[in-house]
Every structure is written in C-alpha cells, then in structure tokens.
Image: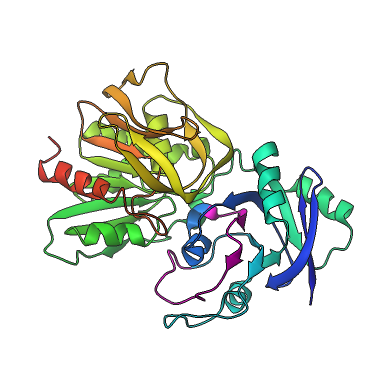
Amino acid sequence: MTTAMLVLEDGTTLTGAAFGAPGETFGEMVFNTGMTGYQETLTDPSYCRQIVAMTAPHIGNTGVNGEDPESRRVWVSGYVVREPARITSSWRATSDLDAYLKAEGISGIAIRGTRLLTKRVREAGAMRAAISTVEEDPARLLERVLKSPEMVGADLAREVTTPEPYTVPATTKTKYRVAAVDLGIKASTPRNMAARGCEVNVLPATATAQDILATSPDGVFFSNGPGDPAAAQYAVDAMRGVLSAGVPVFGICLGSQILALALGLGTYKLRYGHRGVNQPVMDLATRRVYITSHNHGFAAELPADTRFDTGYGPAEVTHVNLNDGVVEGLRLIDRPVFSVQYHPEAAPGPHDAADHFDQFCALMGRGGK
C-alpha cells in the first residue's frame, strides 16, 4: 500500500492510503456533505482547483459510468475520502473509482480522520492544501502549499469554459432559444432546458453582450462556475449589456453572483462555503423551504434592505439560506430577471428547485413581460 500525505496551509498534516493517480496536487481544501453523487461532484467544473473531502464515509460503491459525468473531464484537483469502496456494485458501472481517478490523473487519499478534517476546515475556513505520494517531509510540502495560488482573485471561468460555441437541441418541440453563457456549466443544465422545449446555444465565458444577443435569444442563462466572481469582470460587463437589452435572464451560482455585481452589490468569500445536497433555502415571498444542492465558496453581499435600487430599476433579495442567512436569490422587480445561488438541475441532489426552469420558460413565453 502506497502512503499519501495531506498538508493544509495551517500546518495540519494527515497521512493515509493513496488511491487514484500517484504524484501530488495542490488546491483549496473544501468539504462536501453529499451522501451520493460523487461522479457528478468530480466532474463539476465549479470544483476547479479544489481538493474535495467527502464527509460520507464510504465512496465509490456504485463505480463510475459514461452517463453521469457533468462535463468533459474531472475538475477536482484532489480527492479525500474515509474509505474507498473495495467492490463496485451497479449494473451501470463501467469502471471503479480508483481506476477512473488514475485515468484522469487525479490524486486521492483515504484517511480515517475525515471528521477531524471537516471540523478543521469549518473552524479555520477553506485553505490551501496539497496531497502528495512523493514528498516525505511535511515541512517542505507546507512551504510549497504556502506558495500556491489563493482562490480570492482567481479567474477560473476562462479555464473551464467551452472553447467553442455549441448547441443542445430541444428534446421536445422547440419553443424557445436560450443563449447560455458557460462559466462552468454542468451537462444537466442544458438537458433540463432542452426537456422543456429550449434550444440551448452554449457560448464561451468571455462572450460579450453583442455575441450573446447576436444569437437572437428568447432568454439568456448565466451558469455556475468556479473562482472569484470579482475576477470575472468580462462576465459582469456582458450581464449589464444583456440587462439593458431587456431579454429574460436567469442565473445560477456564479451566474447569480455575476448578476449581483452587475446590480451594484458586492461579493465576498464565505468562510468554508456551501457544498452538498441538503442546504435549506427559504423563498421569502412564499415562505416555502427548498432543500437544495450547492457548490459555492463566494456569495453576494446582503444589502441593507431586501429591496434595493439598481441602475436597472428596483430589485429584491428573494431567497436566503436558513443555516447562515446568505443571499440565495435575486430578482429585478420591473424586468424579467432572476437568479438563485444553488443548483436547480440537482446533479446530484434533490429536485425541489427544478421549477425554476419552468419560471424561466414562463418569462420567455410572455416575451419578457
């Protein structure tokens, strides 16, 4: 058995069994509380440059397959679990988790102390870290961790976005044309829209408002994605141009933070972020509570009042997280524009919020009125 070492930037050092690809990797140490959906987590572009620890104790039971990936590759920098499954048990499996990580070049570590690690991140916040199977001295690895890039100021949407536009056709009769700005989009998102009669034109993260509007969309979607929203000024500029055009707009996760910046709010880095499939979010208008899927380390600043003025008319905070009060949704009151901080496509996760896609289609069906 090969030994691996995990070192956090505060000096915390844990050793365990290596799995996945040998070598070493650096990234921001975060944790995910989901009990299922590890393949979707691994392939979520929002995890770019992050080492992800799973709090569920047994990972890999159902192996991996060719249908569940949410993008073209694994995006996590490294993977931490308590115990990798020794046996794969699923008729859908085409490989096991260890072989999958090896093929993707992703280093992992199995440690008994995932609970200790999670508590450490909760107390000290998300921090830089490294996994290594080649370095034997924790002090030397720590030196390199401290020289690795931080997440604040990181513009990662450019790294994960599609290099070229592509189209996902509607799977029913085509009703609407959607321009989707890929800041780190997951495959389930255009599939959800396609099932509702949307032809989805996916555009690179750096698409300008002119590029977006040139597709003659009935609505514009800004996707989830990794990194610091304040570093993606190009997306903020595109959002402002689209808002001025008056077409319906829907944003999720990073797309919601981009909308917040376009409306004049600030963004900030959360202490350890929201990552999992069990986050309670309240709709302030209906008082309905959604159990939602999350993956974000930044959030929009809460304005002094839930209703506030913007350059595009009055706006309001529509949803908040019941765990910590974080802004989870925004909308313009006089324009067909709204966003949520969580994942309505729920891959993985509960489907409580799938109706947000229906709300977007309803706005497009009314011509933005």
- Using the image, determine if residue 134 lies above or below residue 179: below
Residue 51 magenta-highlighted: yes
Quadrant into which the C terminus falls:
top left
Q: What is the x, y in percent for residue 212? A: 28, 47
Q: Main secondary structure of the magenta part?
A: loop
Q: What is the x, y in percent for residue 211? A: 30, 48
In the picture, residue 23 is in which quadrant? bottom right
Q: Front-most of 163 and 132?
A: 132
Residue drawn at (84%, 49%) of the image = 143
Q: What is the x, y in percent for residue 94? A: 48, 83
Residue 330 magenta-highlighted: no
Residue drawn at (41%, 41%) of the image = 280
The magenta span reads 47-72
Can residue 125 be seen at all in this image of the molecule? no
In the picture, residue 288 is in which quadrant? top left
- The answer to whether residue 276 is left or right of residue 172 is right
Quadrant into which the N terminus falls:
bottom right
Can residue 202 be seen at all in this image of the molecule? yes
Q: Front-most of 7 and 179?
A: 7
Residue drawn at (64%, 41%) of the image = 122
Q: Front-most of 113 and 19?
A: 113
Q: What is the x, y in percent for residue 123? A: 68, 37
- The answer to whether residue 350 is left or right of residue 323 is left
- Using the image, determine if residue 192 lies above or below residue 278: below
Count the marks. 0
Q: Indicate how the structure is coloured in the image.
A: rainbow
